[in-house]
Image (spheres, grey):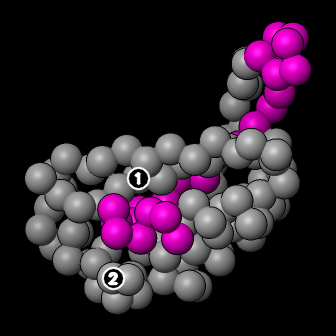
């Protein structure tokens, strides 16, 4: 089992996700981050079905840094309630794992 995570958030503003991605990597909270999209999202908000065009950010980090990543995303995100989801990386090559860990700040 790995301690690596894929952390995902979405926004209707790709530029703000680029800023978040850059911040996470610059601060060594994520080894790398990708911004992709657009995609169409459907959800209930304020009691009504809503649809919007959104973009996604996926960052690679660790369980130990997750709470710092959450604080950073919340602080930089334009949404009142941003989606922040962590998906465990169950396995990956040892070389990639070592690279990810070498790019991150020391564990808190």
**Is disc 2 surrounded by few (<14), some (14 to 19) or many (20+) residues within 10 Å?**
few
- Identity of the residue drawn at 27% across and 50% down: 89
Q: Which quarter of the rendering shows the C terminus?
A: bottom left
Which quarter of the picture shows residue 56? Answer: top right
In the image, 37 versus 105, the foreground residue is 105
Check residue 102 in the rendering and tell me which mark sits there, or answer none: none
**Is disc 1 surrounded by few (<14), some (14 to 19) or many (20+) residues within 10 Å?**
some
Q: Which residues are magenta?
A: 44-68
Where residue 55 appears, as percent x and y from the top left, is 71, 43
Which quarter of the picture shows residue 38? Answer: top right
User: Can the viewer see residue 52?
Assistant: yes
Q: Nearer the viewer, mark 1 or mark 2?
A: 2
Residue 106 on the magenta span: no
Residue 79 vertical placement versus 28 (above, below): above
Instruction: Name the residue beneath numbered marker 1.
Output: 6
Where residue 50 appears, as percent x and y from the top left, is 84, 17
- Identity of the residue drawn at 74% across and 66% down: 75
Magenta part, dominant SS: strand
Where residue 74 appears, as percent x and y from the top left, is 70, 59
Q: Secondary structure at mark 2?
A: loop
Instruction: Name the residue beneath numbered marker 2.
Output: 107
In the image, 105 versus 64, the foreground residue is 64
Q: Cα distance, mark 1 to mark 2? A: 17 Å
Residue 61 on the magenta span: yes
Q: Secondary structure at mark 1?
A: strand
**Residue 9 placement, left or right of 5:** right
User: Can the viewer see residue 32?
Assistant: no
């Amino acid at each position: 089992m790995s301690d690596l995570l894929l952390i995902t958030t979405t926004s209707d503003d790709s530029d703000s996700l680029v800023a978040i991605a850059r911040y996470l990597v610059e601060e060594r909270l994520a080894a790398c981050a990708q911004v992709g999209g657009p995609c169409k999202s459907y959800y209930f908000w304020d009691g009504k079905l809503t649809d919007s065009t959104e973009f996604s950010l996926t960052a690679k980090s660790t369980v130990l840094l997750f709470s710092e990543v959450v604080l950073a995303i919340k602080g930089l995100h334009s949404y009142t309630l941003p989606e922040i989801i962590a998906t465990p990386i169950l396995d990956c090559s040892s070389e990639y794992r070592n690279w990810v860990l070498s790019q991150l700040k020391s564990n808190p």
